[in-house]
Amino acid sequence: MTESPEGYELSNMVETALARTLVFAAEAKRWDVVVRIAEELGRLSEADWGARNYRTANTRTSMRGR
C-alpha cells in the first residue's frame, strides 16, 4: 500500500501546531492545557511509530515472497 506524501505533511503540520501551542500554554501557565496537549502529542507519536512499524513489517513480509 502506498501512502501519499500529503498525509505526512498534514500530520507534521498538526504536530507542529500542537507543539507551538504547548509552548504558549506553558508560558501562560495553563498547566491543564499543557497536560492535554502533551497527551495528544504522545498519542500522535505512538500512532506514527505504530504505523511506521506496521509498514516496515509488511515490507519485510512482502519481500520474502520474491
Image: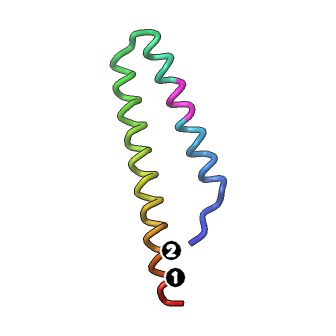
Q: What residue appears at the point 38 percent right and 43 percent down from the top-left corner? A: 43
In the picture, residue 25 is in which quadrant?
Answer: top left
Horizontal and vertical percent position of residue 14: 55, 38
Q: Which residues are magenta?
A: 16-20
- The residue that mark 2 highlights is 59
Name the foreground residue: 40 vs 60.
60
Name the foreground residue: 55 vs 29.
55
Q: What residue appears at the point 46 percent right and 23 percent down from the top-left corner? A: 22
What secondary structure is the magenta-colored segment mainly? helix
Looking at the image, residue 51 lies above or below residue 17: below
Name the foreground residue: 62 vs 7.
62
Say if the magenta span includes residue 18.
Answer: yes
Looking at the image, residue 11 sits to the left or right of residue 50; the answer is right
Looking at the image, residue 58 sits to the left or right of residue 8; the answer is left
Horizontal and vertical percent position of residue 58: 46, 74
Distance between the Cα atoms at labels 1 and 2?
Answer: 6 Å
Asked if the residue under mark 2 is in contact with the one under mark 1, i.e. CB atoms within 8 Å, the reply is: yes
